[in-house]
Image (cartoon, rainbow, N blue to C red):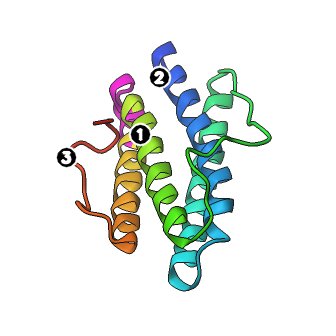
Amino acid sequence: MNTPTPGASSAHAAALTAEYAAIWAYGPIGVRLTGPAQEAARDAEATHRRRRDDLVLHLTDAGASLPADQAGYALPFPVTDEASALRLAVAVEERTAGFWQAAVAATSGAERERALAALVDCAVRATRWRRTAGITPLTTSFPGRTA
C-alpha cells in the first residue's frame, strides 16, 4: 500500500468527519420518511457507514490520526416532516460530496479513484433525493461545489 501524502490524509480525515455527520443526519431523515423513501434513507446510511469504516481502516493503516466522531451534529434547519427530511437528505449528500471533491483534488492513483467513486455516489444520491422531493433542477453542474 502506498503511504498517503499529508494532503491526502488531511482530505481523507475531513471526508471522514463528513461521513460521521451524514450517518448522524440520516436518523432524523429516516424517521420522517415512509415506504421506498425510508428504505432509500436506510440504504444511504448503510453506504455512509461502510465508507466511514473503510476510511477508518485506511487512515489507521497509514498511521494517520482519526478525527473524533461527535455525540451530535447541528442540522441546518428543523426536520419536522417529509419535505424537510428530503431537503436535508439532498443537503447531506451535497455537503458530503464537497468533502470528497476536495479529496479528489488532494489524491492520486487508487486514492483518487476511491474519492471519485464517493463523489459520484453522493452526487447520484443527491439527484435521486431531488427527484423524490420534486426539486428542480435535478442535477448540478459541478457536484460537490457550492454555488
**Which is nearer the N-term, disc 3 or disc 1?**
1
* Above or below for 129 versus 90: below
Mark 3 or 2, which is nearer the eye?
3
* Residue identifier under label 1: 115
* Residue identifier under label 3: 141
Q: Residue at x 57, y 77 (%)?
A: 39
Q: Residue at x 56, y 68 (%)?
A: 41
Local secondary structure at mark 3: loop
* Above or below for 89 versus 42: above
| Amino acid identity at mark 2 | Ala
Q: Using a 10 Å C-alpha cutoff, classify the residue at mark 1 as few (fewer than 14 neighbours), some (14 to 19) or many (20 or more).
A: many
Cα separation, mark 3 vs mark 2, equals: 25 Å
- Which secondary structure type mostly characterizes the magenta part of the structure? helix
Q: Residue at x 36, y 35 (%)?
A: 101
Q: Are marks 1 and 2 in contact (CB under 8 Å)?
A: no
Mark sitting on residue 1: none
Q: Using a 10 Å C-alpha cutoff, classify the residue at mark 3 as few (fewer than 14 neighbours), some (14 to 19) or many (20 or more).
A: few
| Amino acid identity at mark 3 | Ser
Mark sitting on residue 8: 2
- Based on the picture, tell me whether residue 25 belongs to the magenta stretch: no
Residue 62 location in percent, x, y?
62, 24
Q: Is residue 118 left or right of residue 54?
A: left
**Which is nearer the N-term, disc 1 or disc 2?**
2
Q: Which residues are magenta?
A: 104-113
Q: Is residue 15 left or right of residue 125?
A: right
